[in-house]
């Protein structure tokens, strides 16, 4: 007997693939946007009907009679899912050879059950299963079928494998195409005591022996999802604080919103809310909490939604919110003007800010003087404050939660201006009378330059005065009188030639040993020291006219 286990497997796989792809392509053209079943639309029941090809490996021992692949076969299975993904499956597989007509009559049937797991994705549902049960094995026959094969014998069997379903829109999505199912199968059969009578003839009883049959089972076909109850999705429920979106402070209204998923649109939803430590109530998916009476801290709110009494028809959620203390106020403090004279006032301005707009109360204090006012402006009176001192003013604010803030400003009390420096006299230029021996008291042209400077000095300061002191040389004849004339003549020039008011010029005689006259400028407020000087009696000393000398007479020879 020829043993070619892979003789038909390629041919069968080609047929299965062509059939599956053709059906999938046809359905894709009719419904290009099929999505995976989800929620309570996911089918609870699956019935699979299809063709099965078994690529058998094994031989009857001790005769070394091999089994061949069985191309004629069918499969039927049913699955029930407890959840989205997990269920139980029962399967019956029938593989019979072609009988005693010149071919082999190998056969393998299996009845098994076990868990199945599926993973729905868009348009397709992959799955995997592991089945345990019993298998019935018959044959193998020899070439030409000259004697009877082994009888149908049951033994333990198991199956491990999986496949891929293509979900179609047919019959309200109750039809899927099993593109492929590939399983590894193993079964053991004991045919009895091995035959030992030599070469068996046609009348020989069954050979006996045992076999461990294994192989790959390739299947494809149609999956039916009967109408009826589908697996119910478990309700999901989440909740979160939606208002306010930022920090929460005492007195804020907190809004909590619940979001339920996988609800049954045909049933009403019942909502309840609870919290520990404060009352909260609501009958919708939104609830509000008044935090007016709640101290700062973290609080938990629980929500519950239900559409029935079954576990998958209800769900809970929890969320937390934290109440913060109000932020303390801040304040700035300024004085205008910041420097005043003793007894003057300054305006104090405080700018208080509460981040949460709490009401503020203002107060003020000062290290000297008095402050009046209880709003954002006050007045500092500096009466009694020492000149040259600095007054520090404190601006205080307090909110309705007794949170405070302080800031300071300073006001300088100006010191009195120092008295102006005492005016002092200054000496101006001196005039010499020693050049004109014939008129020793006359103001000559050479003295004009000095006298012009003196006139300019006294004109620049209208309040100033002049003191002119005439002097005579020791031993000079009528020295005192000549000294007086020199002072009077200078005054006469300044008054007559330069227009200086005579009342602004005083004349004296001095004791210097020189034929001269000195001049001192006396600003307003300055004192002229006349000690050692003698005031000239201008009534008895008259000025000498400034006339040229008469022409000289020449004697005849």
Image (cartoon, rainbow, N blue to C red):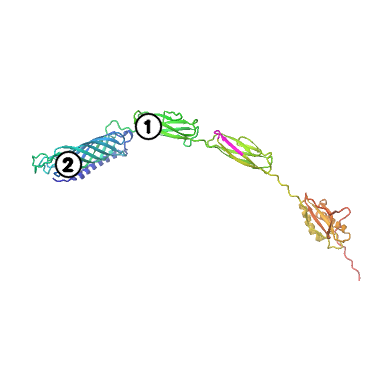
> Which of the 4 quarters of the picture holds residue 186?
top left
Residue 471 place in picture, x, y as percent? 84, 58
Which residue corresponds to the image point at 87% horizontal and 59% vertical from the top-left? Answer: 479
Residue 151, magenta (yes or no): no
In primary-sequence order, the first of circles 1 and 2 is: 2
> Which of the 4 quarters of the picture holds residue 271?
top left
Residue ID for mark 1: 315
In the drawing, does residue 463 fall left or right of residue 188? Answer: right
| Figure quadrant of the N terminus | top left
- Judge the density around disc 1: few (<14), some (14-19), many (≥20) Cα neighbours within 10 Å: some
Label 1 sits on a secondary structure element that is strand
Against 116, residue 423 (above or below) is below
For discs 1 and 2, the disc positioned in front in the rendered view: 2
- What span is in magenta? 394-402
Question: How many numbered discs, if any?
Answer: 2
> Which of the 4 quarters of the picture holds residue 344?
top right
Q: Which mark is residue 211?
A: 2
Residue 324 place in picture, x, y as percent? 49, 35
Residue 397, magenta (yes or no): yes
Residue 522 visible within the image: yes
In front: 65, or 518?
A: 65
In the rendered image, the residue lying farthest to the bottom is 557
């Amino acid at each position: 007997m020829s043993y070619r286990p892979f003789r038909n497997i390629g041919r069968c796989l080609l047929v299965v693939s062509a059939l599956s792809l053709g059906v999938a392509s046809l359905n894709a053209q009719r419904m290009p946007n099929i999505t995976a079943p989800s929620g309570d639309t996911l089918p609870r029941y699956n019935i699979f009907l299809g063709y099965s090809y078994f690529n058998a490996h094994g031989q009857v021992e001790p005769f070394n009679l091999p089994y061949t692949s069985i191309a004629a076969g069918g499969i039927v299975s049913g699955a029930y899912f407890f959840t989205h993904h997990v269920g139980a499956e029962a399967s019956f597989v029938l593989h019979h050879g072609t009988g005693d007509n010149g071919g082999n009559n190998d056969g393998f049937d299996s009845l098994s059950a076990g868990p199945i797991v599926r993973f729905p994705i868009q348009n397709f549902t992959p799955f995997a299963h592991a089945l345990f049960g019993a298998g019935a094995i018959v044959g193998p026959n020899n070439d030409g079928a000259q004697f009877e094969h082994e009888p149908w014998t049951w033994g333990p069997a198991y199956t491990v494998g999986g496949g891929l379903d293509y979900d179609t829109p047919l019959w309200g999505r109750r039809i899927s195409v099993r593109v492929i199912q590939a399983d590894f199968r193993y079964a053991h059969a004991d045919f009895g005591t091995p035959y030992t009578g030599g070469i068996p003839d046609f009348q020989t009883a069954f050979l006996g022996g045992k076999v461990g049959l294994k192989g790959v089972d390739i299947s494809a076909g149609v999956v039916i999802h009967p109408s009826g109850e589908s697996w119910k999705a478990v309700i999901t429920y989440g909740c979160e604080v939606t208002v306010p979106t930022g920090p929460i402070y005492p007195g804020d209204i907190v809004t909590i919103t619940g979001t339920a998923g996988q609800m049954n649109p045909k049933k009403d939803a019942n909502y309840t809310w609870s919290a520990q430590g404060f009352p909260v109530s609501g009958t919708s998916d939104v609830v509000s909490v008044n935090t007016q009476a709640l101290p700062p801290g973290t609080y938990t709110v629980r929500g519950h939604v239900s559409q029935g009494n079954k576990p998958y028809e209800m769900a809970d959620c929890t969320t937390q919110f934290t109440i913060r203390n109000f932020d303390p106020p801040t304040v700035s403090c300024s004085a205008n003007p910041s420097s005043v004279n003793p007894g003057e006032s300054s305006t104090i301005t405080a700018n208080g800010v509460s981040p949460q707009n709490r009401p503020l109360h203002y107060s003020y204090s000062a290290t000297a003087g008095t402050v009046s006012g209880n709003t954002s402006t006050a007045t500092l009176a500096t009466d009694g404050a020492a000149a040259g001192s600095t007054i520090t003013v404190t601006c205080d604010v307090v909110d309705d939660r007794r949170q405070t803030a302080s800031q300071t400003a300073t006001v300088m009390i100006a010191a009195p201006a120092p008295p102006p420096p005492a005016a002092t006299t200054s000496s101006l230029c001196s005039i010499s009378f020693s050049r004109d021996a014939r008129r020793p008291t006359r103001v000559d042209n050479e003295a004009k330059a000095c006298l012009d400077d003196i006139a300019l000095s006294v004109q620049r300061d209208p309040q100033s005065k002049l003191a002119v002191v005439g002097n005579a040389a020791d031993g000079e004849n009528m020295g005192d009188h000549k000294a007086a004339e020199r002072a009077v003549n200078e005054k006469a020039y300044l008054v007559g030639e330069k227009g200086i008011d005579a009342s602004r010029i005083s004349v004296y005689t001095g004791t210097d040993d020189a034929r001269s006259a000195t001049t001192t400028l006396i600003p307003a407020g300055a004192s002229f020291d006349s000690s050692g000087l003698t005031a000239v009696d201008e009534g008895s000393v008259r000025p000498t006219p400034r006339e040229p000398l008469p022409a000289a007479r020449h004697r005849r020879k």
